[in-house]
Image: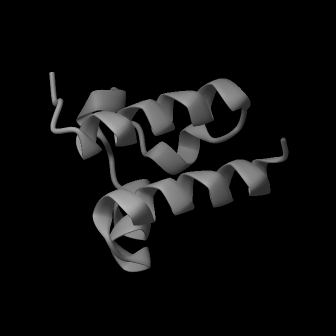
Amino acid sequence: MTRRQRIRAAREQAREVFGTAEAAKVWLESECPALGFVRPIDLLLDDEGLKSVIAILVRIEHGVFS
């Protein structure tokens, strides 16, 4: 999977979780405490990073923050 494809997948998942493309963009470009204060977009260099970002989005979607 290319970086562009990983970004697209993360944006789609984030849009589902947050409801709008703008909210998804803001989340992807903001530091995330659950990811060690790294911006989710910066983790999308490889498939493992995408898995981490998707896992956090699933946790957010289900209300699991710990």
16 left or right, relative to 50: left
Looking at this view, name the residue that lies furthest to the right: 2
**Residue at the image point whose x is 33% and y is 26% from the top:** 36
**Residue at the image point whose x is 53% and y is 50% from the top:** 41
Please tell me in which quadrant of the rendered image residue 29 appears. bottom left
Residue 51 point in image, percent of width and height? 57, 29
1 left or right, relative to 16: right
Q: Is residue 30 visible?
A: yes
Residue 38 point in image, percent of width and height? 40, 37
Q: Is residue 37 visible?
A: no
Judge whether 54 appears above or below 16 on screen.
above
Residue 33 point in image, percent of width and height? 24, 34
Judge whether 4 appears above or below 38 on screen.
below
Residue 63 point in image, percent of width and height? 15, 38
The C terminus - image quarter: top left
Judge whether 65 appears above or below 27 on screen.
above
**Residue at the image point whose x is 84% and y is 46% from the top:** 2
The N terminus - image quarter: top right
